[in-house]
Image (cartoon, grey):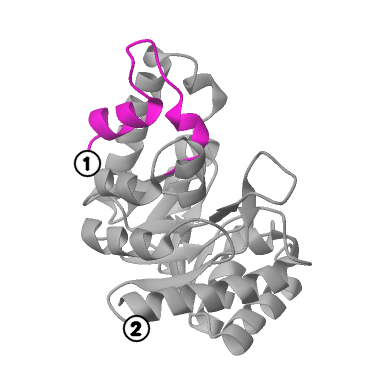
Amino acid sequence: MGNIKVGVQLFTLRDHIKNYEDTDKTFAWLKNELGVDTVQISAIGNFPAEQHAELVKKYGFDVCVTHKPWDRMLNDLDKLIDEHIALGCDQIGLGCMPDEFRTDLAAVRRFVAMANEIGRKMKNRGLTFGYHNHAIEFAKLEDGRTIMDVLIEETDPEVFFFIPDTYWIHMGGVNEAEYLKKLKGRVKVCHFKDWAVKLGENVGSITELGCGMLDFDACYKACEEIGASYIVYEQDNNYASSPLESTAISYKNLAAIHERNK
């Protein structure tokens, strides 16, 4: 199905992967009912990492990236890398920078220096560091730039990569497809997350992929242009009736987007 692979961010199904048995059932459902072969592992239950790898191998999943805590990157990096090698996953993602680094430009630069160093250590062992954005990175700093501007301009492009999220880019006040183009060469995985305004409401919220207002054909083309290898569906909340139903709807729509644009 083309050069880009599509899959599911397991954060959407976090209530269904809390232990080994539930994760086994959820993986079987993804594989056998939806035909999913690519996943991002996030918010998986606190059972041994060896069993995570066991289930990944059992179902033949390609783990394109994870989200792991900043504290482990700082204090347990070698073991974290070992776990990813066992998963067959070559990118470790950070879901968001800690609050302490978002206060001003100097704080953001402290994060940049630390993340660059972590990224270099990962690169030395064949992995890459990925940063997932929210809308907060589009807040202005005292020099007029956004936090995201600083991350793009002052991180090392050889060791610091991005995991852009279409919903949060949109919520940040910019056009998601056009903004993706600013990240050329620095994206392995992109999150496709849709945005909609419900009748009678003034503020947009997350919805099933393909059921909202974002132009995912344009986003897909932008992902091709910037060299992304994977697109994964993610939905934090506002499920149709359950995370399982929302995933079924959204993955079918993602596959259709993929098919018509590949």
Quarter of the view holding residue 225: bottom left
> Residue 175 location in percent, x, y?
38, 44
Residue name at image x 69 percent, y 56 percent: 46
> Residue 255 location in percent, x, y?
46, 78
> Residue 36 location in percent, x, y?
52, 80
The image shows residue 27, relative to residue 175, as above or below, that is: below
Element under disc 1: loop
Q: Which residue is mark 2?
A: 1
> Residue 180 location in percent, x, y?
32, 49
Residue name at image x 55 percent, y 74 percent: 251
Q: Is residue 132 left or right of residue 241?
A: left
CA neighbours of label 1 inside 10 A, class few (<14), some (14 to 19), many (20+): some
Q: Which residue is mark 1?
A: 157
Q: Which mark is residue 55?
A: none
Residue 78 falls inside the magenta stretch: no
CA neighbours of label 2 inside 10 A, class few (<14), some (14 to 19), many (20+): few
- What is the residue that sits farthest to the bottom in this orientation? 32
Residue name at image x 52 percent, y 75 percent: 253
What's drawn in magenta, residue-wise?
A: 132-157
* Mark 2 vs 1: CB contact within 8 A: no
Q: CA distance from mark 2 to mark 1?
A: 29 Å
Q: What amino acid is at disc 1?
A: Pro
Taking depth in this image into account, of 153 and 219 the one nearest to the observer is 219
- What is the residue that sits farthest to the right in this orientation? 241
